[in-house]
Amino acid sequence: MMKNLLNVLGALALLGTTMMTQAQTPPAAPVAPVAAVAELQAGFVKSVRGNVQLLSAAGTARPAAAGDALGSVDRIVTGPDSSAAVVLRDDTTLVVGPSSRMDLKEFHFDATTRDGGLLVSLLRGSMRMITGLIGKTNPDAVRVETQTATIGIRGTDFIVQTDGQP
């Protein structure tokens, strides 16, 4: 059962890595249903250039790599001359520029009803967003925050830049 769950999760995250076997990772607790685990995953890292870190809601940091899963409340931090592209489950694409800090504060999406919401906070640096199904079906459900403004999205492709100073 664990091997099947890992195979499904691997396909959802579009990872090209080899799946672990059940003998290598015995479950420490009951396994959550696939739908519940998929709901926690907002998307995946499509590409990385330079020094990019992913910080989870729990505060753990890890270097980002193409194919890494992105949680529904993760932070992306890029170094100088670095960038990352992320694709969310509704096909929203976020490109985070150099010396940036972006929080994915909220992401939920139901693929059946195409209902969802997205809140991104750009703390410093730059970001390009190409909205996916959430932005196309319900533009009011997509918001971008900076330290000085909250932007309601009406377009489908835009760039936001902030200097990070209040």
Image (cartoon, rainbow, N blue to C red):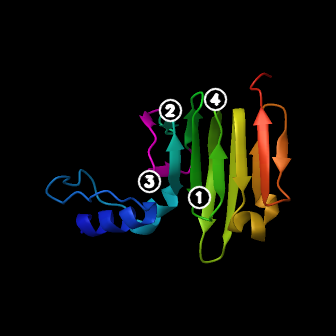
The dot on residue 88 is 1
What is the spatial separation of the Cα atoms under label 2 and label 3, in whole angstroms? 16 Å
Tell me the chief SS of the magenta region: loop
**Number of the front mark, 1 or 3:** 3
In the picture of the structure, the residue carrying the numbered disc 2 is: 51
What is the spatial separation of the Cα atoms under label 4 and label 1, in whole angstroms? 22 Å
Circle 1: residue type: Leu
Say whether disc 2 or disc 4 marks the residue closer to the N-terminus: 2
In the picture of the structure, the residue carrying the numbered disc 4 is: 99
The dot on residue 67 is 3
Q: Is residue 99 visible?
A: yes
Q: Position of residue 152 (x, y in %)?
A: 84, 52
* The C terminus: image quadrant: top right
Residue positioned 44% across, 65% down in the render: 12
Which residues are the magenta region? 59-73
What is the spatial separation of the Cα atoms under label 4 and label 3, in whole angstroms? 22 Å
Q: Position of residue 23 (x, y in %)?
A: 13, 57
